[in-house]
Amino acid sequence: MTPRPDAFDTLAVHAGAEPDPDSGAVTPPIVMSSTFAQEGVGRPRKGWEYSRSGNPTRDRLERAVAALEGGEFGIAFASGSAATATVVELVGPGDEVVVGDDVYGGTYRLLERVARPRGVVPRYADVSAGGPGLAAALGAVLTEKTRLVWFETPSNPLLKVTDIAAAVRVVSESSGGGRRPLVAVDSTFASPALQRPLELGADIVVHSSTKYLGGHSDTVGGIAVTNDAAVAERLRFLQNAIGAVPSPFDCFLILRGLRTLPLRIARHVANAGAVAAFLAARDDVACVYYPGLRDGRHAHPGADVAARQMRGPGGMVSFVPAAAGGLTARERSVRIAESSRLFALAESLGGVESLLELPAAMTHLSVAGSPLEVDPALIRLSVGVEAADDLVADLRAALDGSLG
């Protein structure tokens, strides 16, 4: 009999974490060696030669995340930006990349200041529209030169949601039977605990494993997963040739984080829902962006899509305070950011602790003056796993205090 497939929660604990074959250790040892003794000239032992080219601990991480994404091939990198840059290397001079119009500032910087000078042309579109709107948005930017379609869902920092299956369908239809552009989804804000883009037709899923995969703000990493053997072979070649690989210890930390990913994500989602509901009920909050809000003046336009393709709306919430108390929205946002007690003022996201930042001045400073420019008063929250009542109380005090 074929064994029943393991549930996601079980995979999270066991994928890539098989007991060490030599000692039986249930926490596999970290292989820190930079090089490996070979059986003879041209005969590496079990395929291991040099840790840039391959490392047993990194191999465990790559297998683990691939399993959690329902994918066949995982390729790990030294950061999420390194993973992004390597995927963009699949595109050559003269080719075009269609990009969602709300992306991490570092991705925009890479595309505009690294890829564009080497001849790659980024074309931006709002791919969060549903139905005919999505087809129209993509149709306006897809050309015979498009080789890659890249978007985040949920996006950073406005939490836009893209219908992955519909986007893949539109891209496929646009190719007219010819070579279809690759579709890559940055699923960092969701993690595989909430969303698996490969099952929805995407060719590549990318994560900053610094975030929810690691989950403890103590390591930096990135990973790409694909089912396409040719794409995997090329990414693996680039991984080795460029050399932006994670250390074995970083791989170990992310592997350790994966084992509690479902538990942490459940708490992130519950807490983010409580925080979003609190913010949405305040008259002095102008906008709340959260895919779990389905009713009221802050109802998210992508809530139905999120409910259909995700197993929860995630742990990220963004909002804009209203001008009040004689202060502008921007002035209030700075006061809120600098007075919160439990939400640390810091970049990054996805750790067990709650974080708060102003994207326009921090993670998205590179998009200033561009069509992707962020509202200077926007506050982005990474809602942690603390007690929800404490987080709400902290935000209430910060909001009240910002009124003067």
Image (cartoon, rainbow, N blue to C red):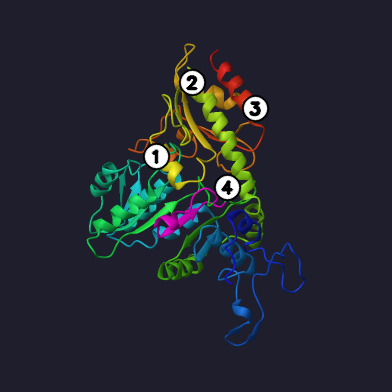
Give the residue type that dot 3 points to: Asp
Vertical arrangement, residue 256 with respect to residue 238, above or below: above
State yes or no: residue 206 in magenta.
yes
- Please tell me which of labels 2 and 4 falls first in the chain: 4
Q: For the magenta stretch, what is the residue range?
A: 193-209
Mark number displayed over residue 108: none
Mark 2 → mark 3, Cα distance in angstroms: 26 Å
- Label 4 sits on residue: 212
Give the residue type that dot 2 points to: Glu
- Please tell me which of labels 3 and 4 falls first in the chain: 4
User: Residue shown at 59%/21% (left/top)?
Assistant: 396
- Label 1 sits on residue: 367
Mark 2 → mark 4, Cα distance in angstroms: 31 Å
Residue 346: in sight, yes or no? Answer: no
- Please tell me which of labels 2 and 3 falls first in the chain: 2
- Label 3 sits on residue: 389
The x and y percentages for residue 186 are 45, 51
Q: Please state which of residues 321 and 312 is positioned toward the viewer in this rendering.
A: 312
Q: With 27 as the anchor, is 154 left or right in this view? A: left
Mark 1 → mark 3, Cα distance in angstroms: 35 Å
Tell me if label 1 and label 2 are in contact, CB under 8 Å. Answer: no
The x and y percentages for residue 23 are 77, 71
- Please tell me which of labels 1 and 2 falls first in the chain: 2
Mark 4 → mark 1, Cα distance in angstroms: 24 Å
